[in-house]
Amino acid sequence: MTRAMWYLAGLVLVALTTLAMSLALAPQVRPPLGAALAIALGVQGPLGWWVIRSLGTDRFLAAWGVGLGARLGLIGVIALIVVPALHWRMAPVLVPLTLLLGVLLLVEGTAAALGNTRNGVR
């Protein structure tokens, strides 16, 4: 399997696991978790894809740096603008968002590593 396929499989696995786990939570916690999942997938998905596709090229460091800055900026924008504007509590949105971004970053690294294990660097 290629890095891209590993990455897509990881994204789907994280999304399905999060949705399944949300069923065990109280109904009032589900909307912020759903928002965190949508935001994390909407930002991390394309950024991770860019990093995966740029591995082994001259643009890798740029992709990695932009991705890191975008993730940090996203958390700041959500905390300082979105949550207060929607009158949400910080923790129910920021904790799952930060955890999901971290897990999706692990998916990115795992996809990069697994994509190299069989036939050399792709």
Image (spheres, rainbow, N blue to C red):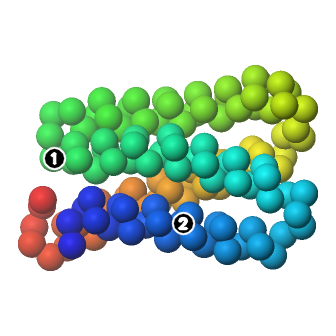
Does 69 appear above or below 101?
Answer: above
Q: Is residue 61 left or right of residue 14?
A: left
Q: Quadrant of the C terminus?
A: bottom left
Pointer 2 or 1: first along the chain: 2
Label number found at residue 56? 1
Mark 2 or 1: the one toward you: 2
Say which amino acid is labelled 1: Gly
Question: At which x and y percent is residue 5?
Answer: 28, 65
Q: Residue at x 44, y 48 (%)?
A: 45
Question: At which x and y percent is residue 9?
Answer: 39, 68
Q: Is residue 44 left or right of residue 55?
A: right
| Labelled pair 2, 1 in contact (Cβ < 8 Å) | no
Identify the secondary structure beneath mark 1.
loop
How many angstroms separate mark 2 from mark 1 (CA)? Answer: 26 Å
Does 31 appear above or below 64?
Answer: below
Q: Residue at x 84, y 31 (%)?
A: 86
Identify the secondary structure beneath mark 2.
helix
Q: Residue at x 83, y 50 (%)?
A: 92
Density class for disc 1 (Cα within 10 Å; few <14, some 14-19, many ≥20) is few
Label number found at residue 84? none
Does 121 appear above or below 72?
Answer: below
Say which amino acid is labelled 2: Val
Q: Is residue 88 left or right of residue 63?
A: right
Q: Is residue 110 visible?
A: no
Report the residue marked by disc 2.
Answer: 14
Dividing the picture into quadrants, the one containing residue 71 is top right
Q: Residue at x 56, y 64 (%)?
A: 15
Density class for disc 2 (Cα within 10 Å; few <14, some 14-19, many ≥20) is some
Q: Is residue 65 left or right of residue 44?
A: left
Question: At which x and y percent is residue 33?
Answer: 74, 55
